[in-house]
Image: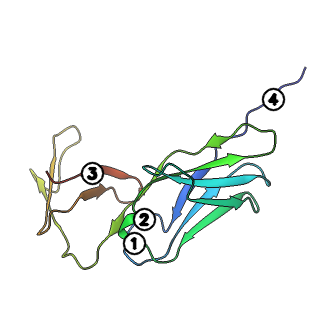
Amino acid sequence: LLSLTPEPRPSLSLSPSHDVALRDRVTLQCHVAGHNGRVTLHKEGVSHPLWYRDVVRGAAEFPIPAARREDAGRYWCRYETKGGRPEESERVELVLRDPTYPRPHISLSPGAVVTRGTGLSIRCWGLHRATFVLHREGSAAPVRRQTPG
């Protein structure tokens, strides 16, 4: 009896994982189960792969030395081996902070302390018509995104 267990999907991560400002260095890292093969990096809205890399010690790195506005977006990686079926990672979002903008304001209603199960409103505002991204401390993934309009 031969049992084949599928390899886990590749995973894509950012380093640093959050609070990346314009002109900061950020690296996208694609982690794979194998030690050979090729990884391509993709971005939503772009029809072709951005970069190609060979796997080294179970990973492929895609550095962005100085992040620009156009680098913000949702990325994923695709892992292929000779004769194997290509596998794609989940999407990861690169959110960039503009340090030239003043810090936004945040308020909680009814207040900072609430009982479990009680409703809570979170309001963010600032001087510019910017997209607000709400993060929970300890989690890299945004909780909510609000675009003006």
Residue 71, labelled with which disc?
Answer: 2
Q: Which residue is drawn at 38% across and 69% down?
A: 19
Are discs 1 and 2 less than 8 Å apart at CB?
yes
Residue placed under numbered mark 1 in the picture: 68
User: Of label 3 and label 2, which has the lower sequence position?
Assistant: 2
Give the alpha-carbon distance from disc 4 to disc 3, as whole Å: 41 Å
Residue 145, labelled with which disc?
Answer: 3
User: Of label 4 and label 1, which has the lower sequence position?
Assistant: 4
Q: Position of residue 99 (x, y in %)?
A: 28, 78
Front-lying residue, 86 or 91? 86
Instruction: Say whether residue 103 is left or right of residue 84.
Output: left
Q: Which residue is drawn at 17% across and 48% down?
A: 114
Q: For marks 2 and 4, give the one nearer the viewer.
A: 2
Quarter of the image for the N terminus: give it.
top right
Residue placed under numbered mark 4 in the picture: 4
Q: Position of residue 7 (x, y in %)?
A: 72, 39
- Residue farthest to the front, as pictured: 47
Q: Which residue is drawn at 13% across and 51% down?
A: 149
- Residue farthest to the top, as pictured: 1
User: Of label 1 and label 3, which has the lower sequence position?
Assistant: 1
Mark 2 closeness class: few <14, some 14–19, many ≥20 residues within 10 Å: some
Element type at marker 4? loop
Q: Where is residue 129 in the image (x, y as percent from the top left)?
A: 15, 63
Give the alpha-carbon distance from disc 1 to disc 3, as whole Å: 20 Å
Give the alpha-carbon distance from disc 2 to disc 4, as whole Å: 39 Å
Residue 11, labelled with which disc?
Answer: none
Q: Quadrant of residue 8?
A: top right
As shown in the figure, which amino acid type bears the numbered disc 1?
Answer: Arg
